[in-house]
Structures are given as C-alpha cells and as structure tokens.
Image (tube, rainbow, N blue to C red):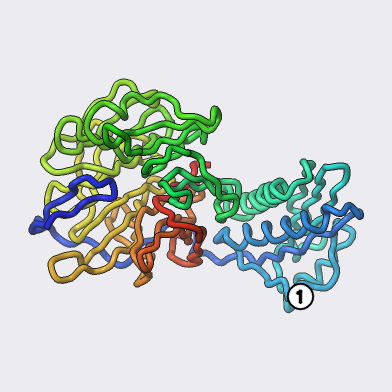
C-alpha cells in the first residue's frame, strides 16, 4: 500500500515501525496562562453621539467586534450583555461602577465609551475601568479618529480590544489585528486567500488558476511563500503583498518538486522540501532565493519543515525514514536529529511562538485494519509529554499557532468537506471560520 502526501508526492510505504520506547502522556501545560483565573470583564455597548445616518451601523459593527475580540481572547470571563446595567455610559462621569461590580454583572473590569461619525470621519473614545476601585478606576483611555467605514469600525474595535488584552493579559499583545492565510477553491482553482483572525474580510490574494498549497506569511507580513503546480511540476512562488504581484524566488524553481516553504523568525531564510536531488529533502535558502543548500540526506521523504521562532536555529519536520511519517527536530545545519513521535502517522508540525511546544496532526492508531482518526496535538519538547486537543470531530490537520501563544487555527474535514477552524491551545472554544467552498492549510501571521 502506498501513501501520498497532500502535495501528491509519494510519502511513505506502509511498513513496520521501528520499535522505540513510548514517552507520550496525556498531559501537557501549554504555558499560555489558560489555566489561570480569568478576569470577569464587561463590555458595554458604546454610546452613540450625534445624528449622522452612518453612526448606528458603524456602532453596531464596533460593538459586536469588540465583544467578540474580548470573548475570543482566552483570558476573560465575559459578562453576558443581558446582565449589563441599564444605560449607556459614554464617559467617566457617566458610569456608575457600583452597578457594574454588583450582581448580576459582578464585573471586575468594564470597557465602555462613545462613538460618533461626522463629515466622513469616525471618532471613538474608549475607556477601561476597574469596577472595584472607585477612587482611581481608569486603567485605560484611548481616542481614535479614522475614516468612517465599516471596515475601519472593525479595525478600531480590534485596536481597542488589543489594548485591553495587552493591559490585562500579562503584557502579551492581542491578536485582533492579525491575519490568517489559507487555500480556498471557491473560485474554481486553489488560490491563496487571506482573512481577519476571526474569519471576517475573506478575500483572494492570488489569481493563478492552478493548484496552490501551503501559504506561509513572512514575519514582516510583506510576502507570502507558497507551493504551486505549473507546467514543470511543483515550485515555490513568492507573492509580494506590498506590490500585489509575484516576485522572483529562484531557489523554489530549480528542478524536482519544491514544496512546503517555511520562514525563519528573522525573515532572512526559508526552509523547504525539494526532490531535485532524488528523494524529497529539506533545503534552506536565503529569503531572496539564493544560497540554497540541502541539510538532510536520508532514504525516504523529508517534508514540512518549520523553524523554532525562539531560537531561530532549530527546525521540526516530517520524515518517512522509518516507514510511516513521524515528527523530528534538528539543528539548522542538519545535526542533532531527534525523533519526537513514537508511532502512528504524524504530520504538519508548527512551533509555538515561545519555542517550547509543537502542535501537529497525529493519527496515533494508524495501521493495517485500524485507520484510527487524525487529531491535533500539542507536545512539550523538553518532556515530550502531549495533549490531544481535538476528539472525534472529523479529520484534523495543518495546525498553526497564533502569535499570542493562546490560539491555534487548523483544517477540519467532515463529510469530505474541509473548512478552517480556530481554538484555544487547551482545545476549548472551537470555532468554524470558513463556510464557502473548501478551505485548507491555514497559516497565522506573525503579528
């Protein structure tokens, strides 16, 4: 029996696995602070100021986006708006904090403010108060003045939410302004698409009319590397988001099948898989496509590299050298090879931003007569303990970590249809982000 990867490359022959000691356990602490007591936070609907006809719609977009961002953050116990006191405070002198700190709201913190539109401009005043500190309540005060559009109302809500998350979430930047890149077939071909972190504002990036896979955004958000199928086979292409066009990447087009690009954390190098020398091996080039050199040389395919963003000197990848695919790590010169998974079918590794954890797709029971199921796992690299995040919910693959270390986006296939989902790194708050067409291989932006 022959297995093939998503790239159409021969991946592995079904063979007996090498016998190694089992080190996996159903436990891992992700280090994301998700187990800490959550701050009980209320988000009031903002006060509408003025009679501009745009204001009600902009306010509705702002209010819903702000609440969604704070609810998705993973660090707050959000007060249901049905528990909010009556009235809409728009300024410090208009809020009665004792009403917000009392039942049923029982809030520790309150976000509130005012919004107006006039002469094509959107003005927002946002406040965050400590509901239990009446003497000195204000924690945050921000003013925004932008073009009065629905997209900008969402953007301002994202910015204010990220300010709140930064202040109350342990000094970690929020992700409300981050992007997710993915593959979609909704236009008839598999193109690179982009969306906001919450699934809004979905739009195509490329229009190549071919099959593209594995989009990877650069650390500075200026370029997307991806694999695409052309007349000469699979090549790695580079798309500039600043120029809105393809730019040269010679390392990805030199013979063989070239797939699965991955950026180093400093943006100066790209690792990828290439079969130009025979078996698919891991190669590294500089960001402009020069200086390509091979760092693996084993029988059997080596694919799907990913850099450790903390050290910028270590990679994880998938190798078929023992039969079924397993996850390995190595130094960027190919030394220090270590196998992490102990059996089954393990693919699609991605490092956490803190460099301590890997998330990947794993079918632990895969074998003759028992197809098992593929789920998303997180592994602590130092202890090799792991946590299963998805359970009996379709086939799950291609996880990608958010820059705040608290969220994972992934692909889930149910009934033959693939969609993009997100969740917290403990597996909770699973949320479907795409619904139109089929959608694959998400990649979260670095910031």
Residue 245 against residue 55 in the figure, above or below = above
Q: Quadrant of residue 418?
A: bottom left
Residue 137 coordinates in the image, percent (x, y):
78, 58
Residue at 61 percent of width and 63 percent of height: 71
Q: Is residue 330 above or below residue 322?
A: above
Q: Quadrant of residue 56?
A: bottom right
Relative to the observer, which residue lies in front, 219 or 52?
52
Vertical placement of residue 367 versus 410, above or below: below
Quarter occupied by the N terminus:
bottom left
- Which of 190 and 98 lies nearest the eye of the viewer? 190
User: In percent of the image, x 38 and y 32: which residue is there?
Assistant: 237
Residue designated by label 1: 102
Seen from the viewer's position, the closer of residues 124 and 396 is 396
Left or right of residue 222: residue 309: left
- Residue at x 53% of width, y 33% of height: 241
Q: Residue furthest bottom?
A: 104
Residue 28 drawn at (x, y percent)? 35, 62
Within-10-Å neighbours for mark 1: few <14, some 14–19, many 20+: some
Query: In which image quadrant can residue 260 be found?
Result: top left
Is residue 163 shown left or right of residue 193? Answer: right
Q: Is residue 31 visible?
A: no
For this orientation, the residue located farthest to the right is 51
Q: Which element type, helix, strand or loop, lies under badge 1? A: loop
Horizontal side, residue 234 vs residue 266: left or right: left
Looking at the picture, how far across and down is residue 126, in whole percent? 77, 52
Estimate the x, y position of residue 178 in percent, counting from the top left: 56, 46
**378 vs 293, nearest the viewer:** 293
């Amino acid at each position: 029996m022959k297995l093939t990867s998503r790239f159409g490359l021969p991946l592995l022959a079904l063979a007996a696995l090498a016998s190694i000691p089992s080190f996996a356990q159903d436990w891992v602490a992700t280090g994301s602070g998700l187990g800490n007591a959550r701050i009980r936070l209320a988000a009031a609907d903002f006060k509408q100021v003025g009679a501009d006809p745009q204001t009600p719609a902009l306010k509705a977009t702002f209010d819903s986006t702000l609440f969604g961002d704070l609810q998705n953050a993973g660090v707050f116990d959000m007060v249901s708006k049905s528990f909010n006191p009556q009235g809409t405070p728009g300024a410090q002198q208009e809020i009665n904090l004792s009403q917000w700190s009392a039942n049923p709201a029982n809030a520790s913190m309150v976000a509130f403010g005012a919004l107006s539109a006039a002469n094509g401009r959107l003005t927002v005043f946002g406040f965050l108060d400590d509901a239990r500190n009446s003497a000195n309540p204000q924690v945050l005060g921000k003013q925004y003045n932008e073009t009065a559009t629905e997209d900008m109302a969402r953007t301002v809500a994202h910015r204010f939410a990220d300010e709140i998350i930064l202040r109350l979430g342990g000094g970690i930047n929020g992700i409300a302004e981050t992007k997710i890149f993915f593959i979609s077939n909704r236009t008839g071909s598999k193109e690179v698409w982009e969306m906001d972190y919450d699934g809004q504002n979905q739009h195509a990036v490329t229009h190549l009319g071919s099959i593209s896979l594995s989009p990877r955004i650069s650390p500075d958000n200026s370029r997307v590397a991806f694999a695409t199928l052309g007349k000469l086979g699979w090549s790695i292409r580079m798309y500039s988001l600043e120029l809105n066009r393809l730019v040269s990447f010679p390392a990805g087009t030199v013979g063989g099948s070239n797939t699965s690009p991955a950026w180093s954390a400093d943006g100066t190098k790209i690792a990828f898989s290439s079969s130009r020398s025979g078996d698919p091996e891991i190669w590294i080039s500089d960001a402009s496509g020069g200086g390509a050199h091979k760092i693996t040389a084993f029988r059997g395919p080596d694919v799907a590299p990913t850099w450790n963003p903390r050290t910028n000197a270590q990679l994880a990848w998938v190798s078929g050298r023992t039969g079924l695919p397993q996850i390995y790590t190595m130094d960027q010169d190919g030394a220090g090879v270590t196998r992490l998974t102990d059996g089954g079918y393990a693919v699609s590794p991605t490092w956490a931003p803190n460099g301590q954890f890997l998330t990947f797709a794993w079918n632990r029971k895969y074998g003759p007569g028992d197809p098992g199921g593929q789920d998303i796992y997180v592994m602590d690299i130092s202890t090799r303990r792991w946590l299963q995040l998805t359970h009996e919910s379709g086939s799950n693959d291609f996880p990608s970590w958010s820059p705040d270390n608290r969220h994972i986006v992934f692909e889930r296939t149910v009934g033959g249809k693939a969609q993009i989902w997100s969740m917290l790194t403990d597996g909770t708050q699973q949320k479907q982000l795409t619904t139109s067409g089929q959608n694959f291989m998400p990649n979260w932006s670095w910031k």
